[in-house]
Image (cartoon, rainbow, N blue to C red):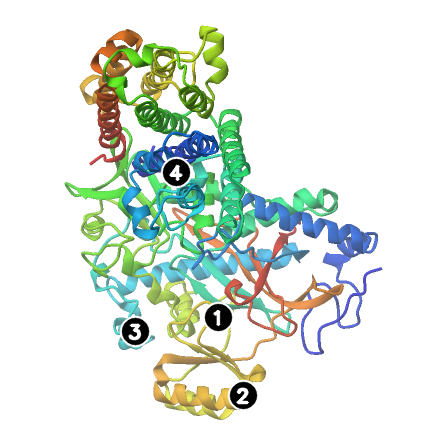
Amino acid sequence: MLSRTAAQLYWMSRYLERAENLVRMLDVTHSLSLLPQSRGAATELAACLAVTGTLQAYQARHDRLSAEQLFRFVGVDLENPASVLSCIRQARENAHAVRGQITSEMWEAINTSWLEARELPRRSVVEPSAFFDWVKERSHLFRGATYGTLQRNDAYNFIRLGSFIERADNTARLLDVKSQLIAPAVDTLAPVDAPAESAPDFYAWNALLRSLSAFEAYHAAYRDSLNGRRVTELLVLRPDVPRSLRACCDEIRAILPQIESREGDLDAGRKVKQLAGELALRLEYGAVDEILDTGLHPWLTGFLEDSARLGLAIQRAYFEAH
Amino acid sequence: MHALTLPPAGHYDEMLLQTGAIRPSYQAFSDWLQAQTPEALAKKRSEAALLFHKVGITFAVYGDEAGAERLIPFDTVPRIVPAEEWQMLEKGLRQRVTALNRFLWDIYHDHEIVKAGLIPAEQIFANAQYQPAMQGLDLPLGVYAHITGVDLIRHADGGYYVLEDNLRVPSGVSYMLENRKMMMRLFPELFARYPVAPVAHYPALLLNTLRQASPADNPTVVLLTPGPFNSAYFEHAFLAQQMGVELVEGQDLFVKDGFVFMRTTVGPKRVDVIYRRIDDAFLDPLAFRADSMLGVPGLLSVYKQGHVVLANAIGTGVADDKSIYPYVPEMIRFYLGEEPILYNVPTWQCRKAQDLDHVLSNMADLVVKEVHGAGGYGMLVGPAASSAEVADFKERVKANPANYIAQPTLCLSSCPTFVERGIAPRHIDLRPFVLSGRDVNMVAGGLTRVALKAGSLVVNSSQGGGTKDTWILES
């Protein structure tokens, strides 16, 4: 497959996954901001900008943080290149360039998403919850069309690779930021292990799980009250929770050998497979106590660095042949 | 009952005789048509538009950030060409394209036709489309124009005339293929009534032609596009997919150790044939336009070593230039020793004083065109122009006579076409696609373009033209 084509498929998929994850994050921020005793609403909102690295861009355009302006900025502002709509636009542009490599169902799904999306900024009112549901639905539709119609070839492999790299990154960031807000002392020891007794903590963990569609999984797995230790274990180490770091890394590790390659030393993807293997094994044989001993924030920071290194290796191996 | 109207007197209608009777080739279609209700036909037309949108057969994405691509209007009345007419056309096309390839070989080698005094040297060597870099280069099979689109019209006398040859990057073949698919889908019953020659094997023929063009064993063919923002991108993607070859952009290719490679996920892969859909000037920023972002640096040097084939070759534009067009009949006689089968439209070359006088005094009756113009721009249709427009154009011609040619206003034949109210005659042309490899090949078909405005003679899609399916009948 042409390197450019592979890169465009991969980025199409990453941008769409990013749009979905951004919406999941906005959703949790939104529901927390509705709580009466929401602990420092401003911190909550700022965290949202911190995750996307757009705090400065926001400050350049707005002088104060409000839930509504934040929603516009991160959600439907096309001048913010990191907004949900900008991600959908980028995904659609990449899809347009590789139209011959995806099925018409996939193209129609993504093109329609964009055609509907570009109308939103012109509307005076965009209802947040309806917007969140819409983005998730469009994302599910595209994923379903891909799963149901695309030939199992390298196009399929690069699309899936993009999804899981992006998703692992997003889950890690969301967990990092939210856990710091909920229990600033989480890096030390005890607090995450204690039941979330205070109402704000309970609602915060609850919202985080819901935003990652992992609320039901939590209860099925633990049948117990919410606490940070278990939430961490669920979102980092459980292989059966589709947005957990472990699940994403297992997928990545399984996809890589399916990509067409040469043998042995000539395999351009050798380094990628090595990194992905290391990452997956670290999670497979990891334990939550070790993570908490290291401190969740430092541990997640390390994970994000490793996954960025993996992303770079993918870039070098497959997209930059020369 | 659908009322069919004749075009103004003096025009040839493809379906109707001057008496209003149906021509034999259209009789079965007409019987079928009269049995359809206008509502049923209108439904089919909107179905066609919807399907074209869905498949994404669109045109002109220039300046579009929104994805609202435009459809070329498709008309559901086919253009039917009787078998014996096509047999003549096919022979004539074969002859003409063969002569044009011989001409290109000649002007980049020994210049026999110039030495024989048939074409003035400055017409060739001072032509902006002439590429000195091609002088003396031997191309495999001696083929320059692997793909040629020849624009034909039928005049009031019932004869076909060549309006122009397209030897650079002729486009439109995807519409020929998609229009046929659409007609078969909408009106399968018509194909039971007519022995319509199939066209669907065109991509296979094209791939064969491209592979033959390379001396390599099992050559790797790619299609080079300027990218998604080019107006013909749909066609590029379509043909690449149909042929099963990679659709590449300039950035996907690079030159190393005297060969061209493409960047793939398993490393560099050698490329032997480039079916390029970008103009000469953009091919290689080192050799031509330095600001080109579309090409491949160093491509020309690889080409000159014979390590890659370009289809079409560099420098073919000199043969389809409007200033060279009047000499094509002479080329056929000179290179092939045959009489031309297809007529040329009589052409006045304004660079000649005598012709210029004639053009200036008769401009209101003539079609005046820029020598290098294309796409229906920079031309004057005398009878349709106001006297102010004619006067203005006269000044332009006087200022630079060599830049213009003029032809009599041809009555392009008309074909019944669906318009806002019912069916009305509209002018059409025909572009068959001729492939030159070891032999000259073509599918029996072509792109029929139709001028949708009443009375208009401009069929270009950029100027409000539409298309029709073209049915070549088998005998």
Q: Which numbered disc, 3 or 2, marks the residue that appears first in the sequence?
A: 3
Q: State the residue in front, B308 or B336.
A: B308
Q: For the residues carrying marks 2 and 1, which lies nearer the camera in this image?
A: 1
Q: Which mark is residue B376?
A: 1
Going by the numbered disc 4, the residue's amino acid type is: Val
Q: Which residue is mark 2?
A: B364
Residue drawn where x is 47% and y is 26% of the image: A151
Is residue B80 rendered to the left or right of residue B232? right
Q: Quadrant of residue A264?
A: top left
Real-space Cα distance between discs 3 and 1?
A: 34 Å
Q: Which mark is residue B116?
A: 3
Write the residue at 28% across / 41% down: B272
Residue A271 horizontal/vertical position (percent): 20, 21
**Chain at tag 1:** B
Dots 3, 1 in contact, CB < 8 A: no
Asked whether residue A231 is in view, the answer is: yes
Q: Residue at point 60% right, 71% down?
A: B412
Q: Chain of mark 4?
A: B
- How far, Cα to Cα, is label 4 from label 2? 49 Å
In this picture, is B458 found above or below B180?
below
Q: Amino acid at mark 3?
A: Ala
| Rendered location of residue B19, percent (x, y) | 79, 72
The residue furthest left is B257
Which badge, 4 or 2, comes first in the chain's sequence?
A: 4
Give the mark nearer the N terminus: 3 vs 1: 3
- Residue A197 appears left or right of B21: left
Q: Position of residue B328 (x, y in %)?
A: 41, 69
Q: CA distance from mark 4 to mark 3?
A: 43 Å
